[in-house]
Amino acid sequence: MLDSTETSLLEVSELNTRFYTRRGVVRAVNDVSFDVKTGSLVGIVGETGCGKSATVRSILGLIRPPGKVISGTVFFDGDDLLTLPSKQLRRLRGARIGFVAQHPWGALNPILKIRDQFRNVITAHRTANSDECYEMALEMLQNVEISGPERVLNGYAHELSGGMAQRVVIAMAMILDPKLVVADEPTTALDVTVQRQILDLMKTLITEEGRSMLLVTHDLGVVAQYCDSVVVMYAGKVVERALCLMYSLIPLIHIRKH
Ligand SMILES: Nc1ncnc2c1ncn2[C@@H]1O[C@H](COP(=O)(O)OP(=O)(O)O)[C@@H](O)[C@H]1O
Ligand SMILES: [Mg+2]
């Protein structure tokens, strides 16, 4: 552990996830342990295929066959997510943990107006009428600095650019005020010019409200600029944990080359 003086919001221990494929067993997550302190931004970095997505999907209970979480504990705010009944886990996702995936299109419904998608997210977790949902969504879209928020709410996903769609997804992930936001390469699918704007925005929204974030990326520059600490993965394992200070990035760069 890097610093055990602050409380952990998320504590992952000895997590193991396998994919049972026809070609054999893929040990996608291998004894992975790390934690996210309250109010901190933690990066998970590593090359494609090293198990970053499998790790966050395991934490969120989103691994589907042929995959299976076979052992480990994931403590979040007092609950072991791996033993929580699926109904309770679904309630927790969205309300106490927000998830932002790589492709905004996968998270948005193409045939529902954006306002109705916000309403579905909100009413899945609390009682609110249509007007209240609209007002909440409008305020959140203003927070993510989207231009023409009313037009966006009354339109459909296909009318949005990639950057705008990801802002909508971020707004949906944060509308119920989650303590933790998990973002899996949230800007990889976007133009380079938009990437930094979105990351700046996420960092502001997270730190202003005292939330925590687990940010998956393959970009060490992003980790250095946005995260407090980093978990480096290689072939399903954690090979390095470090605070994001300049000196601690030197061994990381070294690892990346080998
Ligand atoms: N649904 C799946 N079926 C079989 N193997 C999978 C599946 N999802 C991921 N894997 C394998 O698990 C490993 C880790 O993948 P992933 O977590 O997606 O990597 P990353 O997000 O770091 O790029 C890879 O070897 C990948 O091929
Ligand atoms: Mg991935």
Image (cartoon, rainbow, N blue to C red):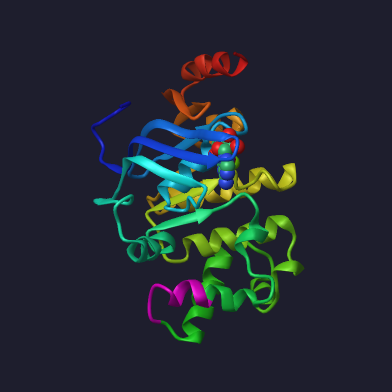
Residue 129 screen position, x and y as percent: 45, 86
Residue 44 screen position, x and y as percent: 50, 34
Quadrant (top left/top right/bottom left/bottom right) for the N terminus: top left
Residue 242 screen position, x and y as percent: 42, 24
Quadrant (top left/top right/bottom left/bottom right) for the C terminus: top right
Count up the numbered dots: 0
Classify 237 as above or below 20.
above
In the rendered structure, does residue 2 fall within the stretch colored magenta?
no
Q: Is residue 247 visible?
A: yes
Q: Residue at x 57, y 74 (%)?
A: 117
In the drawing, does residue 73 fall left or right of residue 202?
left
Q: Residue at x 49, y 27 (%)?
A: 232
Judge by depth and name the residue closer to the eye, 237 or 149.
237
Q: Quadrant of ligand 1?
A: top right
Q: Is residue 217 visible?
A: no
In the rendered structure, does residue 124 fall within the stretch colored magenta?
yes
Q: Quadrant of residue 213?
A: top left
Q: Residue at x 33, y 51 (%)?
A: 81
In the drawing, does residue 5 fall left or right of residue 109?
left
Residue 238 screen position, x and y as percent: 44, 26
Classify 82 as above or below 33.
below
The magenta stretch spans which residues? 119-127
Q: Residue at x 58, y 79 (%)?
A: 116
In the drawing, does residue 244 fall left or right of residue 9?
right
Q: Quadrant of residue 13?
A: top left
Single out the residue that lies furthest toward the front.
Answer: 22
